[in-house]
Image (spheres, grey):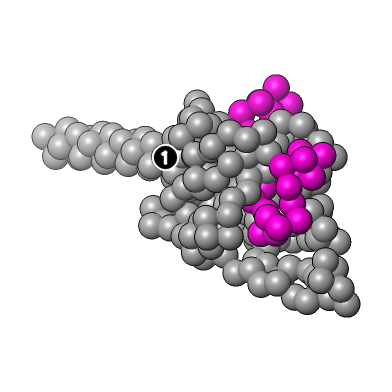
Amino acid sequence: MLKRNALKTIAVSALSISAAGFFSACSDKKKPEFRGVDITGAEYARDFPLTDHNGQQRSIKDFAGKVVVVFFGFTQCPDVCPTALQELAEVKQMLGKDGDRLQGIFVTVDPERDTPEVLKAYMTNFDPGFLALRGSPEELAAVAKDFKIYYKKVDGKTPTSYTMDHSAGSYVYDTAGRLRVYNRYGSGAQALAADVKALLAEAG
């Protein structure tokens, strides 16, 4: 009798461990580990109600079903901006057939010089499917505040030769339009690609 009870206890324990493992696996699937900073549930960077370089008003809702990566910069940026966009283009290539499920968004902090024509030509250098957004100074200020983005005009030798100081980093949204990851500038294409793949796998 004692032996039978002992066997029952072992069997129940084994089932419990198995069930715990199952639920743990389910839990892990719901919460992917990111290489960037996990900001799931953040109450900022909710949307980017600006106009793209084709003249179309945009919103995060336009890109349902895609992982969206948003970066702030300006076209005359000498290194940080083109590096970030080139890495994003590399990420899209790394995704292979899933590349179409990635949407790159570039928000200019220099709408004075970055006209729609300039932005369209600039994005073509990286990927024709990526979109550049711009707005009035007031619209940009509102979006930058929501994203906690810093930007400031730095005067040059002439009125038009100024540069822009700005925050550098990418905001990554899942396929349902929820902010999930902040990818610091300099993390590299491999890290960003891993996070994008994790979000696509989560979506199925």
Q: Is residue 115 above or below residue 72?
A: above
Query: Is 113 or 11 nearer to us in this picture?
Result: 113
Count the marks: 1
Secondary structure state at the residue bearing disc 1? helix
Image spot of residue 141 (x, y percent): 53, 62
Is residue 77 found left or right of 143 in the rendered image? right
Q: The disc labelled 1 sits on which kind of residue?
A: Lys
Image spot of residue 115 (x, y percent): 73, 47
Q: Which residue carries the number 1 mark?
A: 30
Residue 123: in sight, yes or no?
no
Task: Tell whether position 157 is magenta.
Answer: no
Q: Which residues are magenta?
A: 94-121
Residue at image position (75%, 44%) is 119
Residue at image position (76%, 56%) is 113
Mark 1 burial class by Cα count in 10 Å: few <14, some 14-19, many 20+: few
Query: Is 31 or 128 nearer to us in this picture?
Result: 128
